[in-house]
Amino acid sequence: MKNKKLLAARVFNVGVNKIKFNPNRINEISEAITRQDMIDLHNAGAIIISENHGRKKVEKRKRRRNAGKVKKVVFNRKRDYIIITRKLRNYAVELRKQNKISEEKHQEIRRKIKTRNFKSKAQLKEYLKV
């Protein structure tokens, strides 16, 4: 019967310990010699293959949000600063090229842009009208 178990294990591609024979049908199993015989016996219920049990999945511990994890707010503030600064500086350069403002006025506007005196392009335009 040991050889029959080895044959069945090879046919079904499982370990020898997974193969169980039905004790009432030992005669049929002992007569089986081909792979097809083993497959037929398995379909008939004479050979039983036990299921894989595996192991329990270990769930990862949840990470808490604390001071070391807070990043998003600072990043957004910096991104907003970069966007508005580039927009205003480009506008100031454009005005200087068109000779609508002098070099000194341009430098003054750049300093004010750097210190975030203007929240928008519209606010800068309003400042230049005055």
Image: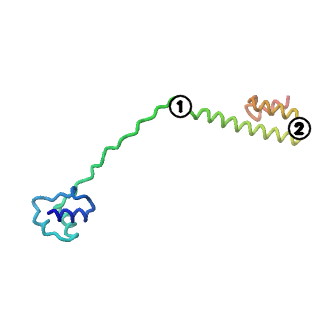
Of 124 and 19, the residue lying toward us: 19
Residue 14 position in % (x across, y down): 26, 59
Please state which of the two labelled residues, at mark 1 or mark 2, is closer to the viewer.
1
Quadrant containing the N terminus is bottom left
Please tell me which residue is depicted at 38% across the width and 40% down the height of the picture: 59
Amino acid type at mark 1: Gly
Instruction: Look at the picture and state if 40 lies above or below 115.
Output: below
Q: Secondary structure at mark 1?
A: helix
Please tell me which residue is depicted at 67% across the width and 36% down the height of the picture: 80
Q: Is residue 81 left or right of residue 7?
A: right
Amino acid type at mark 2: Lys
Q: Is residue 26 left or right of residue 34?
A: left
Q: Is residue 39 left or right of residue 98?
A: left
Residue 10 position in % (x across, y down): 25, 64
Q: Is residue 13 left or right of residue 71?
A: left
Q: Secondary structure at mark 2?
A: loop
Query: For mark 2, what is the residue?
Result: 100
Other-residue count near label 2 (Cα within 10 Å), few / some / many at <14 / 14–19 / ≥20:
few
Q: Which quadrant would residue 40 be assigned to in this image?
A: bottom left
Name which of mark 1 and mark 2 comes first in the sequence.
1
Of 61 and 91, the residue lying toward us: 61
Please tell me which residue is depicted at 74% across the width and 39% down the height of the picture: 86
Residue 30 position in % (x across, y down): 13, 67
Instruction: Look at the picture and state if 4 lies above or below 77.
Output: below
Please tell me which residue is depicted at 13% across the width and 69% down the height of the picture: 31
Give residue 68's mark: 1
